Amino acid sequence: MSHALRSLVMAGLLASAPAFAQDDSAATLDELLEQVRTKTLADQGQLQQREAEFARAVGEQANLLAQAKARRDALENRGSELEARFDLNKREIDTRQQQLDDKLGALKELFGIFQQTSGDLQGIFFDSPISAQYPDRTEFLEAFAKKMSRASEISTIEEIERLWFELQREMTETGKIVRFEAPVLLADGTQGQRDVIRLGAFDVVSADPARYLSWRGETQSLAELKRQPGGDTLDRLDDYASSTDPVARIDLDPTGGSLLERLVEAPGLGDRIEQGGLVGYVILALGAVALLVALERLITLSIIGAKVAAQRRNLDSPQTGNPLGRVLMAYHENRGVNAETLEMKLGEAVLKELPSLNRFLTFLKIIAVAAPLLGLLGTVTGMINTFQAITLFGTGDPKTMAGGISQALVTTVQGLCVAIPTVFLHSICSTRAKAVVHMLQEQSAGLIAQYMEKGSRA
């Protein structure tokens, strides 16, 4: 075989068996054939081994699948057995429940009455100030009502007697006045122990210091009212707390404290002024200015009127300290002129007195007109804020909306409270000023007539 053919055979064998190591190259074709035969036998052995392993794996998977199917069948059988047992137990429960209902009979109605009574008592005890003295009675009612709602247990004689006892005790304590120690939430936010007096189911008061308290059902605690009733109420309460006389006068709230809380929460004069806001303060400032101006005018015009009246009784001795005296001085200074000139001089003298007499009267009129307009401005502004709040938060709370409208109307009330008195003050001051001017005009006309009469005689 030629050298080229030998090389071609060697290349094909190497391509078909790339796993041969490079250092195992054969020197002759016989050696190469031997190596290929040996390698082929080795590969056949590995292939047979792999086939055996795959056959074993297939067998194991078949065993696992069989075991899984057997476990599934066992669980399905177990589920069928449990379902059958569940149906049997359900029928048994229904049978026993029917037997229980038959044995209870009319007792179920009794359980319903007990449940309703205990529920009603819980509502009464929740808002009753008597709970401040007996705070543990609601726990029994809650447990008893829960037990009666199930209707699976028969109430004991002790529980029925306890229910009757709590009902009877509530009625009895309603007519008693009891003094005892209790924790009280004070107006400053702190809590302290106070000697309190419970006046039946109406009110709870503290003895020292004398204060009205309110029973807070949501927290089951006593709290001092932030604002106490005014007048002689606290004085009478103090006298009652320190007195040993069993009969004494004291103010009671028949609603159990609700009316008293609403009464003390009603806004006072300071609160109303604060609700008016900036516009309200402007209105009140104008009212104060109008009052001062009106007082000044009243005093000044009263003094001027008195001086004019005194000058009227003594026309021959004119004084410059009053309007009539100054008009008389003008008359005496112009006695040599003709009647028409004298009339003009006296008219001029009267006109000079008008500014001092009518001073600030126009300002009072402006305040009387502007105050209601400012009140209307504050009301409109407040209504705008109220409707903006409604737009943001809705109308879920009518109380909040009504409170906003009430605050908005405060400025209107303030404007009217300033305008109405200002109108009366302006009228009084204007009337007094006109009376003085009328007197000056009357005396001026009299002097001219007297002067013309003297001239005609001459």
Image (spheres, helix red, strand yellow):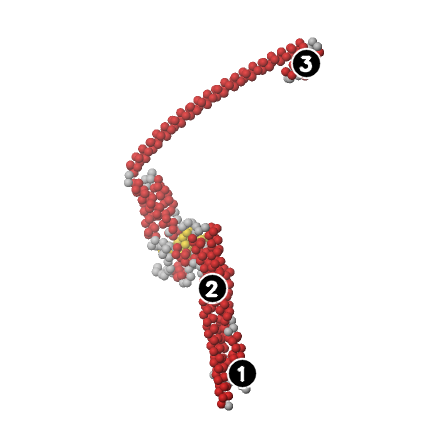
Q: Earlier in the sequence, mark 2 or mark 3?
A: 3
**Front position in the image: 174 or 411:** 411
Q: Residues within 10 Å of mark 2 (few under 14, many from 20)?
A: many
Q: Is residue 168 visible?
A: yes
Q: Which residue is mark 2?
A: 372
Image coordinates of residue 256 in percent, x first then y, are: 37, 54
Q: In the displayed structure, would residue 416 be above or below residue 172?
A: below
Q: What amino acid is found at the position of numbered circle 2 in the picture?
A: Pro
| Residue under numbered circle 3 | 8
- Examine the rendered structure and indicate whether residue 299 appears above or below residue 415: below
Q: Which mark is residue 252?
A: none
Q: How far from the left and from the top, in percent, is residue 187?
A: 46, 55
Q: Position of residue 168 (x, y in %)?
A: 32, 49
The disc, 1 or 3, on the residue closer to the chain's N-terminal end is 3
Which amino acid type is marked by label 3? Leu
Q: Nearer the viewer, residue 196 or 413?
A: 413
As drawn, 407 above or below 65: below
Which image quadrant for residue 13? Answer: top right
